[in-house]
Image (spheres, rainbow, N blue to C red):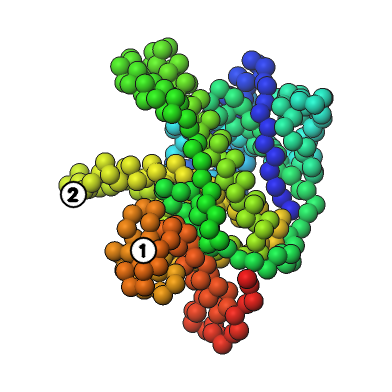
Amino acid sequence: MLTGRRYRLALSETQAQYAELIGGTCRAVWNTGLEQRREYRRRGVWINYRQQAGQLAAAKVEHPWLADAPGHCLQQTLMDLDRACRERGTWKVRWRSARGWRPSFRFPEGNKISVERLGRRWGRAKLPKLGWVRLHWSRPLGGAIRSATLSRDGAHWYVSFLVEDGKQTPRQHPSASAVGVDRGVAVAVACSDGTIHDRQFSTRGERKRYRRLQQQLARQKKNSTNRRKTIAALRTLKRRETDRRGDFARQVANRLATRHGLVVLENLAIKGMTASAKGSIAEPGRNVARKAALNRAILGKGWHRFELALTYAARYTGTGIVKVSAAYTSQTCSRCRSVDPASRESQAVFRCTRCGHSANADVNAAQNILAAGRAVTACGDLGAGRSVKQEPLTIA
């Protein structure tokens, strides 16, 4: 199956400048192509990738700076734009701004890329136009290269290889156990078997330093050298936090996928849940500061990243992933099935007002999620045309 391998590069100054040039050219091609597609849509017509690729070849004659970047990187940018417009719609695709977008481009021809290991910590890769580039050898490549994507994150450049590792998803998981998973803001991951997974992704000192740097940034002049240094320091702190969050998500996802044949999650619209509460100018939102704090707590726990990591890990273990509705899972007693908002005494304590059952609130919600997931696996989604006369699966 296809998988990714990401390495940090050690580019020379000349290579880094050329990579910046390619990234900027690809950004310009994306924005120009998107504006062209929107103009065509205003006229009621459609332009596809083949037409834009043909016009790109003609544009290189009129604009020589386009020829400085590899042609297949520019064509791949137009392919990505075409897929984005077809999947999300032309008007929902975003621009790539010079300040907010991180340079990124792809070499789609894997047969023109070669990778060698130089020692225990270092390796090198031969990329089109860039030549040999050094990389930190953090893990084996483990397969044939299909493509390579270069991206800059902060002060460092990274390469992500799309690799065919030759593995296939098992037809059945060796374990028949099932687990329900509740994602929360007090605890990152709570399971129906009573286990809780959580950690702090930033230290107290890092949080104090981040606030101090934010205050310092507010007093600095825009586009000044000191302001750029402060922004770089802020990004370094955030990168550490992001890396720890990703490592935590992968570890927990791998543990759950290895031990259980079925994992049940809540079907959460995370993008909508973390939307701003400011509203429009005519109708400003209420409790904006409280909603902003909730949004930061949700994003800080990495709900979506954990879901992606679990989906990735399940490909190698054969674990089934089921999503159920999140309605009333935190207000329902897992023992007597009574629904009462008053039973949720606090963020951590659940005490049923009917039967007196007491448990950790997140674990109780995870048990309700598991029960709903078992019902789905036994009878399908109960949609039109689906038979509900099925025996439940014997999952412990």
Helix, strand or loop status at disc 1: strand
Residue with the most extreme top position: 225
Q: Is residue 314 above or below residue 206?
A: below
* Residue 371 relative to residue 171: left or right: left
Q: Which residue is mark 2?
A: 283
Front tag of 1 and 2: 1
Amino acid type, callout 2: Glu
Camera-side residue of 283 and 358: 358
**As drawn, 373 above or below 166:** below
Measured as percent of width and height from the top left, residue 199 is found at 51, 41
Residue at 51% across / 33% down in the picture?
A: 241
Q: Provide the secondary structure element on which disc 2 rests.
A: loop
Q: Do we see residue 203 in this rendering?
A: yes
In this rendering, does residue 40 appear at all? no
The answer to which of 34 and 288 lies nearer the viewer is 288
- Could you tell whether 1 is left or right of 393 in the image? right
Q: Position of residue 10 (x, y in %)?
A: 68, 22
Would residue 126 be found to the left or right of residue 249 on screen? right
Q: Earlier in the sequence, mark 1 or mark 2?
A: 2
Q: Are marks 1 and 2 in contact (CB under 8 Å)?
A: no
- Measured in 3D between alpha carbons, the distance from the residue under mark 1 to the one under mark 2, in whole angstroms, is 39 Å
Question: Dot 2 surroundings within 10 Å: few (below 14), some, or many (20 or more)?
Answer: few
Q: Amino acid at mark 1?
A: Arg
Kindly indicate the quadrant of the structure image that contains residue 223: top left
Name the residue at 72% across, 32% down. Answer: 138
Depicted 7 relative to depicted 293: above or below: above
Q: Which residue is mark 1?
A: 351
User: At 80% from the left edge and 52% from the top edge, which residue is drawn?
Assistant: 166
Badge 1: few (under 14), some or many (20 or more) residues near its Cα, within 10 Å? many
Residue 140: horizontal and vertical position, in percent?
A: 78, 37
Q: Please tell me whether residue 275 is drawn above or below residue 191 in the rendered image.
A: above
